[in-house]
Image: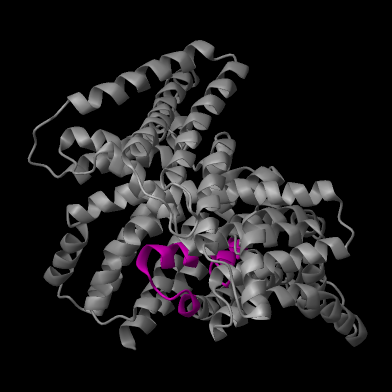
């Protein structure tokens, strides 16, 4: 429905020079509905963004206790959405001027989502034979939900400190990140937070009610269809024909494919899964140690959220109001630099493996022609946005339509196409809920002037561009170890950007540095999302991958250093 709404409006505007009133609002409302219905589906998957590294360190007998405590966070978050949404419905009046529907409908979606989270979590635990444990978690969650508003703890410490501590506790217990954010914002009320429960829900809905965010499900759909239809394999063939004969040729093919695939999917996780299933068997067959092969795949997947289209840059633009087009252009340069550094690292670390014979000119031409459909996707997105022909969301919708037509052209079955839509919707819902729940969290940080504290600290350090870059990188290196990249961008982008601008650093350049820094954490413990994705597909232990990825991690840090030096000097 989202895709149909946006494409219909694009057609009316550019073909018939007209449009229909309320297209953007309808898209936003449908996006909120998608998040509300889809987010509960990711409770048991990696999309829940659980930091389970600390729980895994506990003795086996303590795991059920940690799981029960984490479920309390989810139950509390579900109650906040369910009852907080109901309270807003009772208070809110008015009719949407463009849609003619009551304004409370948008908030009702999120209330339904809260109920679905509670229902799905309960059913999952019952199926797992943990009915008593989930009933206990629901009881404790209900007691906290109804008891906290009656409690006031007088303290001179800022509420944002307790907000961070509660959210941190949720992370340590492996609660879903979005649920930890919501629960922390609610608990902070007892410590003097100025954000009551209805405002928490309202801020959450506002955070996800941006037309730009509709680009996320469309880009995810485009990447999924590109892979499912087999068109992505044409990129592999083209890359192999170009560089497969060189030293470490198959590894360089993996890198070049990642660069090319980056212009299609916009998701590093999607690229890592694709590369692990496509390249890992071939790399191992040609003499690469399994751990090194997986490490190369994970390292090259970092580029997917740097080279446009990039979901990370979309989230940054949403959080900071920076130009999406300018960020995407900056991503091109940064991605190219990172690819060069990775190519050098691969060249010097891969030894004693088979190389392919050089592809004849005819084969290279055939591979290039076969890959043209995949290249067309990048042209639609980047050229359309940069020239200003279409908005980012419209370009993403056109990219999704383009890959859908390619899927039909490849005679892909309806079931596989539907599976791509379902996967994209579920992933987009999980990302959207995270973006929304970061809203109240970021608001409370702003109320306590955390951004001003950072600026003051920079002033103490001298207020120079060098001081800002160093401090920002230290902060981002620290938070990147424990926070998902989306959450880190949403929380720290608005805090660090004003200090960078005050120091004379170009905001676009700083935004690129911020995303590059955080994306590198896809390769570092304890989170290391890209490492765990590759490990899950290839069955190579994550500990072995973390050791093998060190040379490629260092090469990416070199590229980050070059970007930082450029920002300071120029």
Image position of 314 (left or right of 437): right
- Above or below 87: residue 463: below
- Above or below 463: residue 547: above
Q: Which residue is drawn at 35% across and 45% down?
A: 93
The foreground one among 554 and 519 is 519
Q: Position of residue 375 (x, y in %)?
A: 73, 76
The extreme top residue here reads 132
Residue 299 lies in what quarter of the image? bottom right
Residue 493 lies in what quarter of the image? bottom left
Q: Count up the numbered dots.
A: 0
Q: Residue at x 46, y 67 (%)?
A: 516
Image position of 456 (left or right of 141): left
Q: Is residue 318 in the magenta section?
A: yes
Q: Residue at x 25, y 21 (%)?
A: 147
Q: Is residue 182 in the magenta section?
A: no
Residue 164 lies in what quarter of the image? top left
Residue 309 appears in view: no
Image position of 43 (left or right of 534): left
Please provide the residue range marked out in magenta. Answer: 299-327
Q: Position of residue 421 (x, y in %)?
A: 70, 51
Q: Where is residue 353 in the image (x, y as percent from the top left)?
A: 77, 65
> Coloured how?
one colour
Q: Position of residue 563 (x, y in %)?
A: 42, 78
- Above or below 208: residue 509: below
- Above or below 515: residue 190: above
Q: Which residue is drawn at 54% across and 45% down?
A: 33
Q: Is the magenta stretch mostly helix, strand or loop?
A: helix
Residue 332 appears in view: yes
Q: Quadrant of the C terminus?
A: bottom left
């Amino acid at each position: 429905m989202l895709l149909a709404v946006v494409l219909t409006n694009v057609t009316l505007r550019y073909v018939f020079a007209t449009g229909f009133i309320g297209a953007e609002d309808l898209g936003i409302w449908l996006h909120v509905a998608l998040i509300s219905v889809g987010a509960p589906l990711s409770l048991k998957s990696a999309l829940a963004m659980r930091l389970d590294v600390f729980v895994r360190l506990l003795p086996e007998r303590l795991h059920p206790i940690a799981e029960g405590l984490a479920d309390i966070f989810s139950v509390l978050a579900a109650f906040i959405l369910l009852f907080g949404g109901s309270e807003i419905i009772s208070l809110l009046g008015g009719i949407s001027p463009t849609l003619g529907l009551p304004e409370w409908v948008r908030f009702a979606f999120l209330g339904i989502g809260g109920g679905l989270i509670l229902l799905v979590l309960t059913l999952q635990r019952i199926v797992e034979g943990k009915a008593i444990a989930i009933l206990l978690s629901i009881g404790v969650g209900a007691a906290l939900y109804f008891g906290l508003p009656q409690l006031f703890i007088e303290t001179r410490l800022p509420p944002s400190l307790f907000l961070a501590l509660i959210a941190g506790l949720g992370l340590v217990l492996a609660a879903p990140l979005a649920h930890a954010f919501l629960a922390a914002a609610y608990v902070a009320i007892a410590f003097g937070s100025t954000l009551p429960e209805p405002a928490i829900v309202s801020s959450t809905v506002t955070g996800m009610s941006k037309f730009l965010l509709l680009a996320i499900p469309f880009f995810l759909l485009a990447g999924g269809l590109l892979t499912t239809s087999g068109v992505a394999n044409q990129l592999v063939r083209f890359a192999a024909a170009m560089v497969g004969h060189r030293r470490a040729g198959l590894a360089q093919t993996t890198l070049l494919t990642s660069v090319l695939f980056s212009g299609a999917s916009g998701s590093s996780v999607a690229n890592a899964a694709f590369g692990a299933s496509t390249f890992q068997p071939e790399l191992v067959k040609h003499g690469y140690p399994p751990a090194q092969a997986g490490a190369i795949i994970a390292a090259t997947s970092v580029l997917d959220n740097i080279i446009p289209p990039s979901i990370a840059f979309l989230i940054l633009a949403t959080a900071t109001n920076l130009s999406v087009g300018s960020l995407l252009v900056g991503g091109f340069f940064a991605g190219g630099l990172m690819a060069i550094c990775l190519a050098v690292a691969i060249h010097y670390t891969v030894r004693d493996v088979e190389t392919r014979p050089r592809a004849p000119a005819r084969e290279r031409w055939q591979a290039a022609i076969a890959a043209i459909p995949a290249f067309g996707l990048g042209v639609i997105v980047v050229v359309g946005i940069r020239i200003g022909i279409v908005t980012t969301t419209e370009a993403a919708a056109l990219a999704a339509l383009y890959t859908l037509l390619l899927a039909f052209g490849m005679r892909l079955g309806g079931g596989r196409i539907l599976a791509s839509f379902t996967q994209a919707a579920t992933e987009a819902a999980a990302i959207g809920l995270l973006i929304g729940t970061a809203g109240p969290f970021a608001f409370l940080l702003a109320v306590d002037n955390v951004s001003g504290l950072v600026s003051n600290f920079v002033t103490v350090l001298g207020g120079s561009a060098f001081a800002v870059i160093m401090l920002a990188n230290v902060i981002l290196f620290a938070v990147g170890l424990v926070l998902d990249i989306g959450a880190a961008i949403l929380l720290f982008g608005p805090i660090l950007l004003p200090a960078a601008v005050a120091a004379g650093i170009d905001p676009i350049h700083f935004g690129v540095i911020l995303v590059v820094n955080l994306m590198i954490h896809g390769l570092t413990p304890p989170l290391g999302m890209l490492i765990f994705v590759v490990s899950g597909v290839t069955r190579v232990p994550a500990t072995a991958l973390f050791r093998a990825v060190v040379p490629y991690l260092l090469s990416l840090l070199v590229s980050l250093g070059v970007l930082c030096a450029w920002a300071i000097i120029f």
